[in-house]
């Protein structure tokens, strides 16, 4: 019992310091790019920040909006709400790929490890903005 409090404290500390990195593969970015052109570009623009009918999803405004939030929140929002008024149009794998594409346009590098398609796992990952 005596050791319980320091252990809990250490666990708490490590949960802050071991926030996982964002990963996604270049295949996901490629697939996401195709989906973006078909389903998102009409509102968000060819450059992600030049759409007439939607907020920018690249750059300062987007990063201000999502800074301090998790990848899970961003992925769920996109899945539930996008394309606007038509959420859950695509399958989860396609939404995850599109989120990977958006993040790549916000200067996050692809790697060998694909992004998980499990929203709960993505809740443990902070956006780096
Ligand atoms: C019919 C127009 C339209 C289409 C098509 C559309 N969006 Fe959006 N999107 C919006 C609008 C409007 C907002 C802002 C609404 C809000 O924040 O609730 C938005 C907001 C977003 C945001 C959050 C931006 C922020 O700064 O908070 C993301 C991410 C996003 N869209 C991704 C997508 C993706 C991915 C697709 C394609 C699968 C898509 N959108 C298709 C209109 C659209």
Image (spheres, rainbow, N blue to C red):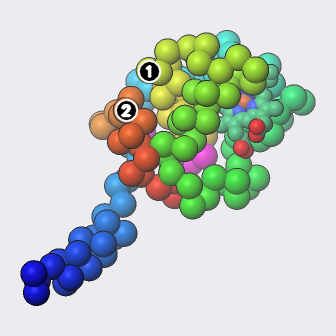
Q: Position of residue 109 (x, y in %)?
A: 46, 45
Residue 41 makes an appearance in the image: no
From mark 2 to mark 1, how far is it between C-alphas?
9 Å
Residue 58 makes an appearance in the image: yes
Outermost residue, bottom direction?
Answer: 2
**Vertical placement of 83 versus 9: above or below?**
above
Outermost residue, front direction?
Answer: 1
**Vertical placement of 110 versus 87: above or below?**
below
> Viewer-proximal residue, 57 or 109?
57
SS class of the residue under badge 1? helix
The numbered mark at residue 93 is: 1
Point out the frontmost of discs 2 and 1.
2
**Mark 1 or mark 2, which is nearer the start of the sequence?**
1
Say which quadrant the C terminus sits in. Answer: bottom right
Say which quadrant the N terminus sits in. Answer: bottom left
Q: Position of residue 27 (x, y in %)?
A: 41, 24
Q: Which residue is mark 2?
A: 118
> Viewer-proximal residue, 94 or 86?
86
Query: Residue at image x 70%, y 21%?
Result: 83
Q: Is residue 124 left or right of residue 48?
A: left
Q: Which residues are magenta?
A: 106-111
Q: Main secondary structure of the magenta part?
A: loop
Query: Residue at image x 56%, y 14%?
Result: 90
Q: Give the quarter of the image for residue 112.
A: top left
The numbered mark at residue 25 is: none
Cβ of mark 1 under 8 Å from ligand 1: the answer is no
Query: Residue at image x 36%, y 60%?
Result: 19
Query: Residue at image x 53%, y 36%?
Result: 75
Q: Position of residue 117 (x, y in %)?
A: 39, 29
């Amino acid at each position: 019992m005596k050791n319980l409090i320091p252990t809990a404290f250490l666990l708490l500390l490590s949960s802050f310091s071991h926030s996982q990195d964002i990963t996604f593969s270049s295949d996901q970015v490629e697939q996401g790019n195709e989906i973006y052109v078909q389903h998102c570009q009409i509102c968000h623009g060819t450059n992600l920040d030049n759409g007439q009918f939607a907020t920018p999803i690249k750059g300062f405004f987007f990063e201000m909006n999502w800074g301090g939030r998790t990848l899970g929140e961003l992925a769920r929002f996109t899945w539930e709400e996008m394309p606007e008024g038509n959420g859950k149009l695509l399958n989860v794998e396609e939404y995850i790929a599109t989120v990977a594409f958006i993040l790549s346009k916000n200067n996050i590098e692809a790697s060998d490890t694909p992004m998980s398609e499990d929203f709960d796992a993505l809740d443990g990952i902070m956006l780096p903005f």
